[in-house]
């Protein structure tokens, strides 16, 4: 069992020591030059019955996000082909649902997964809570990973979401693992939680029977109309420390520098890679939030001396 104290003593190491330790773990377990480029597409936008206080897609808040019904399989194919041409090796699709209903829409998502896998890309979806049967159908369609973030610590969770419980979240993660699908689960920083809450979140994930193979660390992107629209920015060094701690806690996982990159300097992003992050989302939008454009990312990878992605016009909507 991983303990909070273990993670805390790692997190509070002098920063150079922490980064060096994370870099050593990274080098020992993964190819540190391999930073995966993922594209993220919102396949059903807005009108979500959940009340996540950070989310512009919740129907509980008056945000300017336009509702868009479930895309067609052909629309997804076009976006996935464009993302692949731009260098993405993983295509993630998000639907603003509490849970998918069995029926024509879920069948369509299954077809979307097949299409993405047919393009020889990893496919990840995030659809809300799942039953065992739904997880098995996604597995049969070839789904690589299911994203289901726990967002924050168990104790802080009710401050962020009231329409579902932390345990319901864990139940879906278990259903995904039982079906043999790889779990992608992480959280968001900057929602008013403490640094300890962030570490408790990592401890919860590390103590799952099957720890996630993918751990996204998102920085809150305050959205107009949501209760967290005025949330202050998180200190950059806290982000670097959290990524380094996540790398040490999950040596073989992808630690994903996810939402919030558009607010980060090139140097801060590079520090995050040194601390063990090895994945970015690229494309001009992350579901409904802005992201660095593909040209800026190509320049970033070039500056680091890493293979660049071909700049892409619009991999995501
Ligand atoms: S984060 Fe997901 S579940 Fe929560 S309101 Fe937004 S779309 Fe719905």
Image (tube, rainbow, N blue to C red):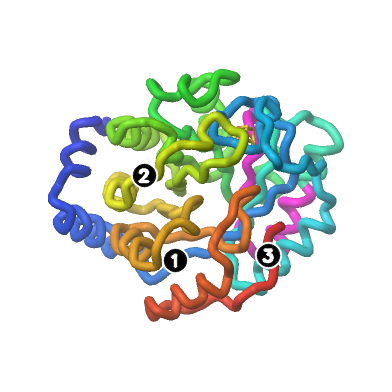
Asked whether the residues under the numbered discs 3 and 1 touch, taking CB atoms below 8 Å apart as contact, a structural biologist would say no
Figure quadrant, ligand 1: top right
Inspect this view and state whether residue 6 appears.
Answer: yes
Which element is circle 1 on?
Answer: loop
Whether 271 is drawn above or below 8: the answer is below
Name the disc covering residue 35, or none. Answer: 1
Q: Is residue 139 left or right of residue 280?
A: right
Does 71 sit left or right of 219 as displayed? right
| Part of the protein shown in magenta | 111-133
Q: Position of residue 300 (x, y in %)?
A: 44, 73
Frontmost residue, 215 versus 286: 286
Ligand 1 within 8 A of label 3's CB?
no
Question: What residue is disc 2 on?
Answer: 234
Q: Residues within 10 Å of mark 2 (few under 14, many from 20)?
A: some
Q: Secondary structure at mark 2?
A: loop
Q: Position of residue 198 (x, y in %)?
A: 34, 35
Which of pointers 3 and 1 lies earlier in the amino acid sequence? Answer: 1
Quadrant of the image occupied by residue 70: top right
Instruction: Report x, y in % for residue 48.
Output: 70, 31
Quarter holding residue 95? top right
For marks 2 and 3, give the CA distance.
28 Å
């Amino acid at each position: 069992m991983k303990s909070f104290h273990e993670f805390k003593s790692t997190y509070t190491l002098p920063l150079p020591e922490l980064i060096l330790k994370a870099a050593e773990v990274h080098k020992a377990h993964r190819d540190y030059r391999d930073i995966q480029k993922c594209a993220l597409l919102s396949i059903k936008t807005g009108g979500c019955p959940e009340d996540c206080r950070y989310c512009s897609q919740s129907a509980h808040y008056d945000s300017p996000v336009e509702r868009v019904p479930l895309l067609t399989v052909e629309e997804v194919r076009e976006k996935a082909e464009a993302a692949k041409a731009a260098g993405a090796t993983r295509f993630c699709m998000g639907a603003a649902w509490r849970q998918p209903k069995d029926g024509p829409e879920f069948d369509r998502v299954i077809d979307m997964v097949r299409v993405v896998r047919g393009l020889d890309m990893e496919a990840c979806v995030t659809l809300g809570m799942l039953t065992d049967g739904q997880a098995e159908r996604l597995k049969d369609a070839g789904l690589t990973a299911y994203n289901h973030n726990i967002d924050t610590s168990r104790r802080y969770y009710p401050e962020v979401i009231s329409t579902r419980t932390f345990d319901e979240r864990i139940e879906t993660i278990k259903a995904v693992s039982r079906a043999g699908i790889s779990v992608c689960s992480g959280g968001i920083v900057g929602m008013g939680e403490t640094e300890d809450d962030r570490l408790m979140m990592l401890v919860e994930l590390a103590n799952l029977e099957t720890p996630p193979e993918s751990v996204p660390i998102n920085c809150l992107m305050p959205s107009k109309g949501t209760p967290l629209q005025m949330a202050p920015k998180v200190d950059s060094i806290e982000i670097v420390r959290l990524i380094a701690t996540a790398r040490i806690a999950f040596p073989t996982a992808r630690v994903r520098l996810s939402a919030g990159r558009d607010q980060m300097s090139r140097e801060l992003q590079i520090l995050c890679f040194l601390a063990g992050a090895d994945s970015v989302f690229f494309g001009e939008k992350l579901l409904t939030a802005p992201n660095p454009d593909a040209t800026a990312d190509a320049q970033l990878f070039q500056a680091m001396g890493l293979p660049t992605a071909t700049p892409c016009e619009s991999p995501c909507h």
